[in-house]
Image (spheres, rainbow, N blue to C red):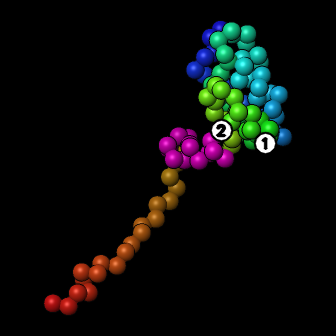
């Protein structure tokens, strides 16, 4: 099974994703023995422990960790899985209207 250029989506991690789990996912040890360097990122509806975040900053391989808040923000920004329920009109004064002729 090839998983290079893939992202793991982890749900149910109520206490967050710790260092050991993140290391094993990024190395490909949990998803499958790939021999190709594992996955490129992890998305979760939960969060990551501080040591998992620090680990990703230190490793040579470019990897991304996206937590639940970031995932929700991305979904809203890109209109994925969301509906517009209300729109606000923003108004500004037209200074030309008040210019004296």
Q: Is residue 77 magenta?
A: yes
Quadrant of the image occupied by residue 92 = bottom left
Percent position of residue 21, x then y: 80, 27
| Residue stretch in magenta | 69-81
Q: Residues within 10 Å of mark 1 (few under 14, many from 20)?
A: few
Residue holding disc 1: 50
All told, the count of numbered labels is 2
55 lies above or below 73 = above
Q: Evaluate whether residue 43 shows in this view.
A: no
Question: Is 12 displayed left or right of 64 in the figure?
Answer: right
Q: Quadrant of residue 29?
A: top right
Residue 79, compared with residue 9, is above or below; it is: below
Mark 2 lies on residue: 66
Name which of mark 2 and mark 1 comes first in the sequence. 1
Position in image of residue 79 (x %, y %)? 50, 44
**Left or right of 33 in this view: 99:** left
The answer for how far apart the CA atoms under marks 2 and 1 are is 13 Å
Mark 1 lies on a secondary structure that is: helix
Front one among 12 and 66? 66
Q: Main secondary structure of the magenta part?
A: helix
Residue, far bottom: 100
Q: Residue at x 65, y 26 (%)?
A: 60
Left-right relation of 54 to 64:
right
Residue 101: percent from left, percent from top: 15, 90
The residue lying at 24 percent from left, 80 percent from top is 96
| Label 2: how many Cα within 10 Å (few below 14, some 14–19, many 20+) | some
Mark 2–mark 1 CB contact (< 8 Å): no
Task: Say if the magenta span includes residue 40.
Answer: no
């Amino acid at each position: 099974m090839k998983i290079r250029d893939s992202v793991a989506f982890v749900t149910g991690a109520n206490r967050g994703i710790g260092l050991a789990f993140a290391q094993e996912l990024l190395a490909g040890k949990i998803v499958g023995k790939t021999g190709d360097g594992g996955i490129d990122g992890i998305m979760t509806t939960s969060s990551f422990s501080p040591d998992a975040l620090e680990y990703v900053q230190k490793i040579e391989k470019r990897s991304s960790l996206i937590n639940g808040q970031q995932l929700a923000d991305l979904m809203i920004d890109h209109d994925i899985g969301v509906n517009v329920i209300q729109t606000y009109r923003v108004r500004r004064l037209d200074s030309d209207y008040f210019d004296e002729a």
